[in-house]
Amino acid sequence: MSAENILSPREARILWAAMAGIIATVTVFAVAQGLTYPLLSFILERQGTTSVLIGLSAAMTPLGFIVSAPFIPALSLHLGGARLAILCSILAALTLISIGWTQNVWAWMPLRFLLGVFANPLYVISETWLISITPAPRRGRIMGLYSSIVSAGFAIGPLSLGLTGTEGWPPFMIGVAAFITCGFIVVAVAPGVPKMPRHGEATSLGSFFALAPLLLFAVFTAAAFEQILLSLFAVYGAALGSAEERIASLITCFIAGNAVMQILLGRLAERLGSTGTMSFCVLACVAGCLLLPLVFNAWLIWPLVFAWGGVSFGIYTMSLIQLGERFTGQALIAGNAAFALAWGIGGMAGSPAAGLAMQLIGHQGLPMSLGLLSCVLAVFLMAGRRRRG
């Protein structure tokens, strides 16, 4: 019997309203974050900043995710999830105002680090809330919907720069307004969300790594895959003589697949199980790596990158579903914080490693790096299934 059948109609309405509010909160936050990456890069490029410094500046936000992750479980229990989320929304808005005020690459280093520190708890708290209140029979489609909408939020951020431009305060004010809106949404949904779970044995991030190493490697793989492709696909395409407009369109197609396919993959997880669906996503990633050099200049590249975007991020969606299936209580909070840590490490490590491979063996180092990463995860998944069998 599902949780919806046990609840009264009024309680069910509150439950669904809370889930909608949680997803809306993270989506608005994703819009603000998706805007900051290209905006700040454009500004630094106009100032004549070197590509090394631009890359180092961008790395400060995922570094903030990594450093803040171990403190989130204790902070969320001490302050409460809603208070911490509201506080982080306000601090993120103030940080973005400071970034707009300073316009200096060296001042932006610590500020972008703080932006990652303040953004991370919001994702951890929201995903913990959503997994906690989602009825198990519908977990696949709801987590798929969550991933799709948040991905769309990240895509909307850069698109908004087409309306505001990249000069002056207007683009910064969109981000600030989005951060503040997050706080208001949390205030609105707070009565319907659960308190941070205190039951179960307290679990540190280190302990969770021991509990679910394969799950965290899957998150690492999804983050590295996405970051490698978004940051180095332009280099790959240029080496094959492709025009910048075509490369940009292909990257947009990849992001669209990322956003659109998560609901479908979530429904598939409800039928086949999250483990089987994750294996499908990983094998599809491997197939994409093999096909990329063959179809890059053909029309088949368009459906390939669309599907690639969906299955590569689907690895993360399946990880979230498995997290909810396997863990509850304080272990769930620790798991979400560990996911943030693994995502940050994957995002920071992936691009430099793939860039080095491309420097050593040429542009085909891109699909080879992505294929190797996917193959390692596929081997670990098969080994894990054999042990369970």
Image (cartoon, rainbow, N blue to C red):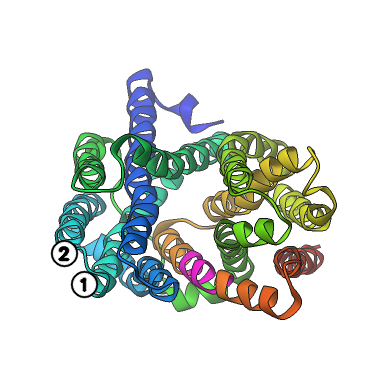
Read off the magenta span.
342-350
Using residue 309 as the reference point, say whether residue 172 is left or right of it: left
Which numbered disc, 1 or 2, marks the residue that appears first in the sequence? 2
Residues at marks 1 and 2, CA–CA distance in whole angstroms? 7 Å
> In the image, 27: left or right of 187?
right
Q: Is residue 271 magenta?
A: no
Q: Mark 1 = which residue?
A: 107
Q: Quadrant of residue 250?
A: top right
Q: Which percent across, then down, holds residue 56?
A: 40, 74
Q: Which quarter of the figure has residue 50?
A: bottom left
Tell me which residue sits at (54%, 52%) in the image: 320
Q: Return the residue nearer the eye: 202 or 324.
A: 324
Name the residue tied to disc 2. 102
Residue 109 falls in image quadrant: bottom left
Tell me the SS state at disc 1. Answer: helix
Name the amino acid, label 1: Ala
